[in-house]
Image: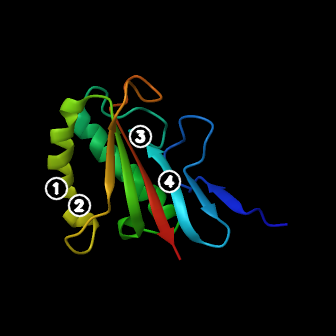
């Protein structure tokens, strides 16, 4: 019997930082839900402690790895949700995103993004987390 939902940790991605999988998707295709990506390398080490710009680069690199692992790319993203620990990092996020997104997406339109500022993330050194909803045909 096929389960209605698959949970996936694509090979070559950074390890999850708790009891969760990187991707949940219906067995019949459609939308997939990518867990919030954190600034962790494939060895499980935190990258860029106290360095928002370095964490941004690692988070989006990890997101790209997860997308590739399910046969997708950034153009499959339907929506982002972005979590910050410090509101003062939003300006840096916007500047880095403005430089990065034209290299990741075709065209000049980008997915919706909800930004939330929270007290902390799963581990104290994390400054940024980005999750995504993705269309997989």
Q: Earlier in the sequence, mark 4 or mark 2?
A: 4
Relative to 30, 104 lies left or right? left
Quarter of the rendering occupied by the N terminus = bottom right
> Rounded to the nearest whole Å, what is the CA distance between mark 4 and mark 1?
22 Å
Query: Where 41 falls versus 124 (above or below)?
Result: below
Q: Judge whether residue 66 can be spotted in this image.
A: yes
Residue tagged 1: 98
Name the residue located 34 percent from the left edge and 38 percent from the top edge.
Answer: 116
All told, the count of numbered labels is 4
> Rounded to the nearest whole Å, what is the CA distance between mark 3 and mark 2?
18 Å
Name the residue located 39 percent from the left edge and 59 percent from the top edge.
Answer: 79
Q: Earlier in the sequence, mark 3 or mark 2?
A: 3
Residue tagged 4: 34
Name the residue located 68 percent from the left edge and 68 percent from the top edge.
Answer: 27
Helix, strand or loop under label 2: helix
> Rounded to the nearest whole Å, what is the CA distance between mark 4 and mark 2?
18 Å
Local crowd at mark 3 within 10 Å, few (<14), some, or many (≥20)?
Answer: many
Relative to 132, 4 lies left or right? right
| Position of residue 7 measured from the top left corner of the image (x, y, whole percent) | 65, 55
Residue tagged 2: 101
Tell me which corner region of the image, top left, top right, bottom left or bottom right, holds residue 18: top right
Residue tagged 3: 38
Local crowd at mark 2 within 10 Å, few (<14), some, or many (≥20)?
Answer: some
Helix, strand or loop under label 1: helix
Helix, strand or loop under label 3: loop
| Position of residue 124 measured from the top left corner of the image (x, y, whole percent) | 40, 22
In the image shown, does 135 or 99 lie closer to the viewer? 135
> Rounded to the nearest whole Å, what is the CA distance between mark 1 and mark 2?
6 Å
In the image shown, does 105 or 10 lie closer to the viewer? 105
């Amino acid at each position: 019997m096929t389960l209605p939902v698959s949970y996936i940790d694509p090979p070559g991605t950074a390890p999850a930082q708790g009891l969760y999988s990187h991707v949940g998707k219906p067995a019949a295709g459609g939308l997939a839900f990518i867990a919030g990506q954190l600034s962790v390398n494939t060895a499980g080490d935190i990258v860029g402690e106290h360095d928002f710009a370095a964490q941004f680069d690692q988070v989006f690199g990890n997101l790209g790895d997860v997308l590739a692992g399910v046969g997708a790319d950034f153009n499959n993203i339907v929506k982002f949700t972005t979590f910050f620990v410090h509101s003062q990092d939003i300006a840096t996020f916007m500047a880095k995103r403005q430089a990065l997104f034209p290299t990741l997406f075709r065209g000049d339109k980008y997915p919706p993004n909800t930004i939330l500022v929270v007290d902390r993330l799963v581990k104290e050194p994390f400054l940024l987390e980005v999750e995504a909803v993705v269309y997989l045909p």
